[in-house]
Amino acid sequence: MKRRSLLALALTAALLSASCGGAKKSAEMKPAPAHYKVLLQTTKGNVLILVHRDWSPLGADHFYELTSMGFYNGDRFFRVIKGFIVQWGINGDPKTNKDWSEIPIKDDPPKVSNKVGTVVFAAAGPDSRTTQVFINLGDNSKALDPQGFTPFGEVIQGMENVMNIYSDYGEGAPQGTGPSQAAIADIGNPYLEEHFPKLDYIKTAKVVP
């Protein structure tokens, strides 16, 4: 449990730089459908996510917006901790990433626990969700529920592919020897291709019927 607590703290700390200061406000998001599906075509196979807007309305709307505009296409799974989470959501183009990572959305009241297969926006404190998303690889309810991490969807097909996403790089810098989120944000996918070539990634992410 101590290890999980440290990992949970690292998850919140990792986004501090993206959530602080000078964030510009986006236009009001249009409400997403009450339920919708997102297909991730990954290097490990397809993953189908069912989003429940009633679980997290603002989170569901934001995920719909980001997916629809192609933000997640080409994104690497840069943080994969066995039994804990698989995380993505730093766009491979630094300018695109900067534009969107500076637009946080407000929190939704937690309604669903962080069980295996739930899909959640990462956060670094109150009202700090931007673009980064993770899937719970284990039951993280005790570690993450008290911190306000709010699932907005669940994997309904392809969880076996999620479990097989490359994880040997481990925790990211500076806590570990894996990818540095700051370097990804500054340099983009070329940094990952050079230093972490085994990372799996999302070929395309799209809303499907």
Image: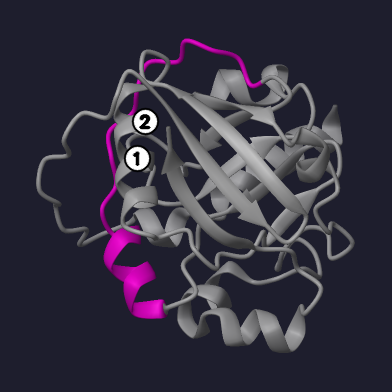
Q: Residue at x 83, y 59 (%)?
A: 166
Looking at the picture, how far across and down is residue 92, in whole percent? Answer: 49, 74
In this view, the residue in front, 69 or 100, is 69
Looking at the picture, how far across and down is residue 49, in whole percent? Answer: 56, 33
Mark 1 near mark 2, Cβ–Cβ under 8 Å?
yes
In this view, the residue in front, 159 or 177, is 159
Q: Residues within 10 Å of mark 2 (few under 14, many from 20)?
A: many
Q: Residue at x 66, y 79 (%)?
A: 192
* Residue occupied by mark 1: 64
Q: Residue at x 74, y 24 (%)?
A: 116
> What kind of element bears circle 2?
helix
Q: Is residue 103 magenta?
A: yes
Q: Is residue 119 magenta?
A: no
Quadrant of residue 53 within the rendered picture: top left
Q: Is residue 109 above or below residue 92?
A: above
Q: Is residue 182 above or below residue 78?
A: below
- Say which quadrant the C terminus sits in: top left
In this view, the residue in front, 110 or 53, is 53
Quadrant of residue 193 within the rendered picture: bottom right
* Residue occupied by mark 2: 60
Q: Residue furthest front?
A: 209
Left or right: 133 with respect to 78? Answer: left
Q: Is residue 40 above or below residue 168?
A: above
Q: Residues within 10 Å of mark 1 (few under 14, many from 20)?
A: many
Q: Residue at x 44, y 38 (%)?
A: 208
Left or right: 193 with respect to 165? Answer: left
Magenta region's main secondary structure?
loop
The circle drawn on residue 132 is: none
Left or right: 99 with respect to 138? Answer: left
Looking at the picture, how far across and down is residue 27, in whole percent? Answer: 10, 48
Q: Which residue type does callout 2 highlight?
A: Ala
Q: Which residues are magenta?
A: 94-114
